[in-house]
Image (cartoon, coloured by chain):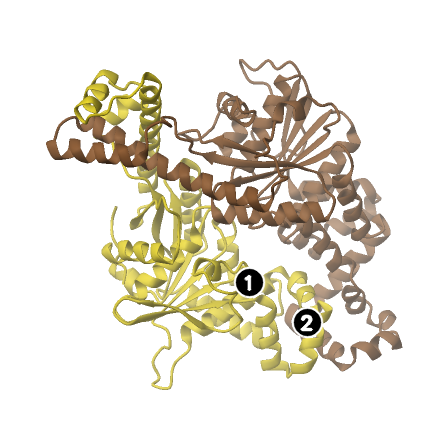
Chain colours: A brown, B yellow
Amino acid sequence: MNRLDFDPLLDDLNTRVLVCCGSGGVGKTTTAAALAVRAAERGRRVVVLTIDPARRLAQSLGLRELDNHPREVVVDGFEPKGELFAMMLDMRRTFDDMVLTHAGRDRADQILSNPFYQTISSSFSGTQEYMAMEKLGQLVAQDEWDLIIVDTPPSRSALDFLDAPQRLSTVLDGRFIRMLSAPARASGRGLLKIVGTGFSLFTRAVSTIVGGQLLQDASTFVQAFDSMFGGFRERAQRTYELLRSPGTGFVVVAAAEPDALREASYFVERLSAENMPLCGLVANRTHPVLAADLPAAKALAAADDLDRSGEAPLAAAVLRLHADRVAVADREKRLLARFTRAHPGVALVGVPALPADVHDLDGLREIGRRLAGE
Amino acid sequence: MTSWTEELTRARLHVVSGKGGTGKTTVAAALALALATGGRRVLLVEVEGRQGIAQLFDRAPLPYSEERIASAPGGGEVHALAVDAEAALLEYLAMFYNLGFAGRTLRKMGAIEFATTLAPGLRDVLLTGKVKECVNRTGPDGRHLYDAVVLDAPPTGRVVKFLDVTKAMADLAKVGPIKGQSEGVVRLLHSGDTAVHLVALLEEMPVRETLDAVAELDGADLRPGAVLVNRVQPTRLPARSVPVAAEGRVDEARVLAGLKTAGLDLDEFTLEGLVDETVEHAVRVQSQQEAKELLGESDLPTLELPDLTDGVDVAALYELAEVLVAAGVR
């Protein structure tokens, strides 16, 4: 097995952006934060962009609220050789800022008060991913940090991070919205012939379902947005290119569970298909056996003996919990071996689970040590 | 651990949500098997296009139709359905706008995705609408076709929005058949026929998220059902040894003596490893305990499911279903 070695990666000044991906609940945010802490302690000037951190994790980085700008992490007893900044993504504010920066005041007001804008900027599926990419682009452009570590939005699939912006731009850039919003202009004979009566039926059905006003709002919004940015698609494409540029690396985080590893597999294949650089897989929260020389069967047999005689309940308990642990570790090893067989080129590091939740900087440091294989 | 209530027994739609990574789909499937035990017919529904049910039951991806996927003890049966918003919209359009052939063309062009993405609430209205149709469907004898429907719902972060059809409808047309349909959905989801169960793990974050979800459900006038605690790890240490061991103090001499009695002569390194494993176990047991106390604040029936070290396969689902039946699920 190919070992994922984080320290050289974090020390390499050519590493400029690290993106932590994975399906929901695998510990992406904690991994991103722990890598950032470690990089800062090793001398990098680093900023970590978190998406939806647990409250106590946010507090451990000194983040009190969403405020959408990187703040230096100032915590007692934390004196890194480099510098650490952290921020939480505020999806709505990022979108608002994007509009304000690029549109004139009047235009911006017009867009910001559009009901359709309000819907998509707060609840559109894919907006969070789109805005995470937008923010990443801004942080890169600001050029104030020599390493940016990005957490990705919680979604069922790791692929959403790559696909959502594209999906959003397809919808907002697409021919449908043009046809629906400006039927007079778009129903040029050619297209209408292809689509035929289905389309006019569809238009009617859609406007019955979503309401004519929504279509009108959507149309106004798209026209304003188009003239401002030259379209969603180009903008999404630019950030996508950034992810493919040298200096960017993807860290895939997975738990040693079948579902999470399946998602990780999809993601790894996708990255390779898109020529995006993969650093490796973090197998998070593993349970390696600490007393490796005692086989489980032997431990269980001995525990049974002790239970029968009623002697030494403590030793019997120790033997049983050891056997449990061996069973868990074996299963995790089996699952990871299966992943490695399918993806022999992917470097991997197992990160032993901490027995309790992490909610301070010391905890993040400890995870950093485990990530580095110390 | 408390048990299933009389009120929950009366529910016909069991919505299962939970933080990502807690094993929502597994628990939903086990619940479906438990409800089917004793001869009932249960439908297990998924809505996120993940084909999680097919994977769990080790089958080919489910088509958009109700397939029988498992039998339950006592002649019960579990059917499964993967609802797809596109298919639901086409079904809907076909029903009200006579759009059969054109619908297929539109699907090829991506028009359906466009419509469901344009109005974010539409997707949820279509999905919950299909679920309602399954819950209310009657057979030739006039009785409900399914005794119960179990919905593997979106995770806690999104579930209230998903179920809050009234709000979603605010984005949509104020008239027309979809309006009428969604009013029926609202009635069902807010009635005693529906219970929203939450899957949790005995860790601080999932428990906090569970409590937040309970408050959010209450706020939206949706009825929280039971908390289903998944992957509960066995406590091996005697209760009195846990707090001391969690602080790192394990009576090594006593362990060593006990091991000798059992005929195990271990080197120092292995003994040290055993002690470390014991300390980690104790810390975990203690944080499970704390999580359990915190969870008690929810004041909901709480059912525990054991951690299965060999992973979840079809046999394991039956094992979990048995645990649920023993806790009173029916």
Foreground residue among B241 and B145? B241
Question: Considering only vertical position in the picture, is B80 above or below A199?
Answer: above
User: Is residue B239 something one can see in this rendering?
Assistant: no
State the SS at label 2.
helix
Q: Residue at x 68, y 62 (%)?
A: B118
Q: Of callouts 1 and 2, which one flags the residue occurring earlier in the amino acid sequence?
A: 2
Is A118 placed left or right of A300 in the picture?
right
Question: Considering only vertical position in the picture, is B287 above or below A179?
Answer: above
Label 2: chain letter: B
Is B170 placed left or right of A105 in the picture?
left
Label 1 packing within 10 angstroms: few (<14), some (14-19), many (20+)? many
**Residue type of the residue flagged with mark 2:** Arg
Label 2 packing within 10 angstroms: few (<14), some (14-19), many (20+)? some
Q: Residue at x 53, y 71 (%)?
A: B64
Is A250 placed left or right of A241 in the picture?
left
Percent x, y for residue B138?
39, 80
Query: Label 1 belongs to which residue?
Result: B124
Foreground residue among A61 and B247? B247
Task: Point out which mark residue A6 bears.
Answer: none
Question: Considering only vertical position in the picture, is A233 above or below A75?
Answer: below
Is B22 placed left or right of B226 in the picture?
right
Q: Are marks 1 and 2 on the same chain?
A: yes
Mark 1 to mark 2 CA distance (whole Å): 18 Å
Percent x, y for residue A288?
42, 31
Task: Point out which mark residue B107 bears.
Answer: 2
State the SS at label 1.
helix
Percent x, y for residue B178?
57, 73
**Residue type of the residue flagged with mark 1:** Asp
Q: In which quarter of the image is the N terminus of chain A?
A: top right
Check the image and name the residue furthest to the bottom: B140
